[in-house]
Image: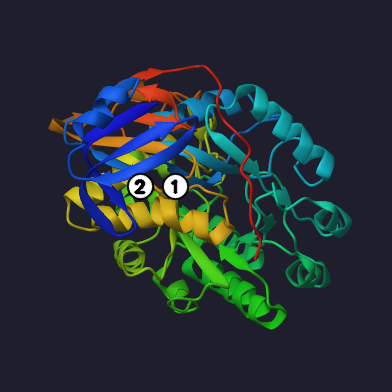
Amino acid sequence: MELIHNGTIVNENLAKRGFIVVNGGFIARVGEGDAPQELIEVCDTVTDVQGAYIIPGVIDDHVHMREPGLTHKATIASESRAAVAGGITSFMDMPNVKPTTTTVEAINDKMERAAQSSLANYSFYIGATNDNMDQLRAADYSRVCGVKAFMGSSTGGMLVNDAAALRRIFSETKAVVAVHCEDEDIIARNRQALVDERGDDLPVTMHTAIRSEEACYKSTKRAVDLARECGTRLHVLHVSTAKELGLFKQGDKKITCEACVGHLWFSDKDYDRLGNRIKVNPSIKTEADREALRRAVASGLISVVATDHAPHLLSEKEGNCITAASGMPMAQFLLPTMMELVEQGVFSVETVVERLCHAPARVFGIDRRGFLRAGYYADIAIVKRTEEPHMVTDDDVLSLCQWTPLTGTQLHHSVVMTYVNGHRAWDNGSVNEEINSRPLKFVRK
């Protein structure tokens, strides 16, 4: 039995001094104030966190672990190491790998791989295609987090572009349908117009002109309209524009949306400094878009903040706007970056915990995770404000790709400990390689 005490517990919109007792992989007790002396005496391990924040483990609903088939970029083992170092205790992985995760057999294969190598708890989306409705019907949604539908092409070539197939997916799926929304015709038209005008060696600053506000809005509107017509439990991933926000309703539990930390941190003005390191799909947009997204996260219109953790080798990020790979690794830095926005007064720490921990658990119906409650799994992150800010460099990166778009950024908070099912997976700069993760379970209402 372990006592974690002398910290500020941030949970369910409250931040107060308190303590937690962990026993057998679960939270046995959450208490306010100082831990009683008699409790200290009976615990096998007593951990004094010296005023740090004690929060639920982060649940990242949007990662690309690259396994199988793309393991030169990343593996479940390598990226789960980076995840726990950043306070992420559970992740949901995307299907655009090789072979794509579009069958029940492929889901089972990934589950087996994760059981052998993941330091964080895990689940996997089953990918939708124009012709795999039989597989979507057969999936076990008590352990499969949802269906991923690419309504715009991105890495992996899984575009769903058949209207009848999309309607079947939206009307028949009995779980969360998570969508990547960008209109492919608009993207193609924008790209061709720029190539005709400037040639095909376009700078990365043109990425936002190609994957434009119009492309995002038209596709997201189509998804939201279809979901309302079909009664779909829809989750729109990585919303990137202010215009899209008008499609969502405050407090709507049927149609929800996510922002990714990259769109909350960067703007198109950062292309000149960071180049292809911040080339992602959908593209990083304007400062005005970023500010609108931040306001929507603060208000709760955007319910979930995630990473879209998408590692590539730096060599694959070379090239121009068309040829350079899109995606960036962010799992290790999601929580520290969001805490930096707390430092800047953009969010409260309670809001960060709501969007990173509580909301993903609610949106997906995750069994006994995302909150600090007695009887819940002991997924916990300890986050401390450092006396001096830390300047991030590529040398800090645990992801296999060994780089970060945050190089040169000063962060005032660090994750000092991460508990996965009561097991200390990250401890003051060291990864514990012993696997104590479990597959996520989902309670569908």
- In the picture, the quarter occupied by the N terminus is top left
Residue in view at x 44 percent, y 79 percent: 246
Residue 385, compared with residue 30, is above or below; it is: above
Helix, strand, or loop for circle 1? helix
Residue 418, compared with residue 429, is above or below; it is: below
Percent position (x, y) of residue 407?
30, 32
Q: Give residue 443's mark.
A: none
Q: Amino acid at mark 1?
A: Val
Q: Residues within 10 Å of mark 2 (few under 14, many from 20)?
A: some
- In the picture, the quarter occupied by the C terminus is bottom right
Residue in view at x 39 percent, y 24 percent: 426
Residue 277, compared with residue 133, is above or below; it is: above
Residues tagged 2 and 1 counted as in contact (Cβ below 8 A): yes
Q: Amino acid at mark 2?
A: Tyr
Which one is nearer the viewer's eye here, 23 or 275?
23
Q: Give residue 204's mark.
A: 1
Percent position (x, y) of residue 144?
70, 48
Q: Please give left or right for residue 152 compared with residue 350 in the image.
A: right
Helix, strand, or loop for circle 2? helix
Q: Earlier in the sequence, mark 2 or mark 1?
A: 1
Which one is nearer the viewer's eye here, 436 or 64?
436
For disc 2, the marked residue is 271
Which one is nearer the viewer's eye here, 164 or 434?
434
Q: Residues within 10 Å of mark 1 (few under 14, many from 20)?
A: many
Q: Is residue 351 visible?
A: yes
Q: Quadrant of residue 115?
A: top right
